[in-house]
Image (cartoon, grey):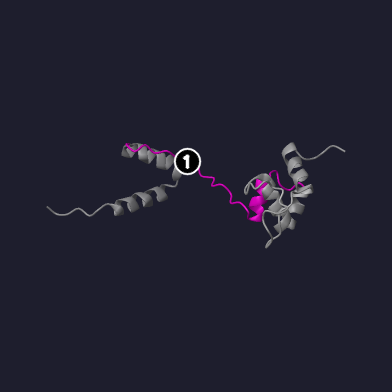
């Protein structure tokens, strides 16, 4: 019978089928721990999932996750990475360049652009009469 999972998912299944051990809560955390001490390494994540989240471990064994990271996020051990791209704005950018960057990368709705412009204008210091 051919395997229905890709290599990455197969690796997750293998790790979940034979997870490293991790000390129980309230015990000497250095005793009988086979994760090598790497708190956020793959072995540690699998061991944590095996110890604290058996339902996630079963899902890993069924091939529901393509990576240990996905399983660790589902368990709440790790946080997902933000999906916003990093946008570099030159410090000497002129207003037209700033407007182009904002409209292209950050805000595409005209009403939101207008409201943002008004909010920026409201942040300007009030001019004093001469």
Is residue 62 visible in the rendered image? The answer is no
Q: Position of residue 81 (x, y in %)?
A: 56, 47
For the residue pair 108 and 73, the one nearer the viewer reads as: 73
Query: Farthest residue in the bottom direction?
Result: 26
Q: Position of residue 89 (x, y in %)?
A: 39, 39
* Neighbourhood count class around disc 1 (C-alpha, 10 Å): few under 14, some 14–19, many 20 upward: few
Q: Position of residue 121 (x, y in %)?
A: 30, 51
Is residue 29 visible in the rendered image? The answer is yes
Magenta span: helix, strand or loop, mainly? loop
For the residue pair 21 and 32, the one nearer the viewer reads as: 32
Query: Farthest residue in the right direction?
Result: 1
Label 1: which secondary element: loop
- Residue 65 lies in magenta, yes or no? yes
Question: Where's the N terminus, which quadrant?
Answer: top right
**Span shown in magenta:** 63-92
Identified at 84% across, 37% down, the residue is: 2
Judge from the rendering whether residue 10 lies leftward or rightward of residue 73; answer left or right.
Answer: right
Q: Position of residue 111 (x, y in %)?
A: 41, 50
- Residue 55 lies in magenta, yes or no? no
Identified at 39% across, 48% down, the residue is: 113
Identified at 71% across, 59% down, the residue is: 24
Query: Farthest residue in the left direction?
Result: 130
Quarter of the image where one finds residue 29: bottom right
For the residue pair 17 and 28, the one nearer the viewer reads as: 28
**Count of number-bearing discs:** 1
Q: Which residue is mark 1?
A: 86
């Amino acid at each position: 019978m051919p395997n229905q999972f890709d290599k990455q998912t197969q690796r997750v299944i293998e790790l979940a089928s034979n997870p490293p051990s991790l000390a129980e809560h309230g015990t000497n955390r250095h005793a009988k721990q086979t994760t090598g001490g790497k708190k956020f390494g793959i072995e540690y994540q699998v061991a944590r999932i095996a110890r604290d989240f058996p339902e996630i471990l079963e899902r890993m064994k069924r091939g529901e996750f393509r990576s240990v990271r996905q399983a660790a996020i589902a368990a709440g051990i790790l946080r997902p990475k933000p999906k916003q791209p990093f946008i570099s704005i030159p410090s000497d950018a002129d207003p037209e360049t700033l407007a182009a960057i904002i409209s292209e990368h950050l805000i595409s709705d005209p009403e939101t652009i207008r409201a943002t412009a008004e909010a920026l204008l409201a942040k300007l210091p009030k001019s004093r009469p001469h």
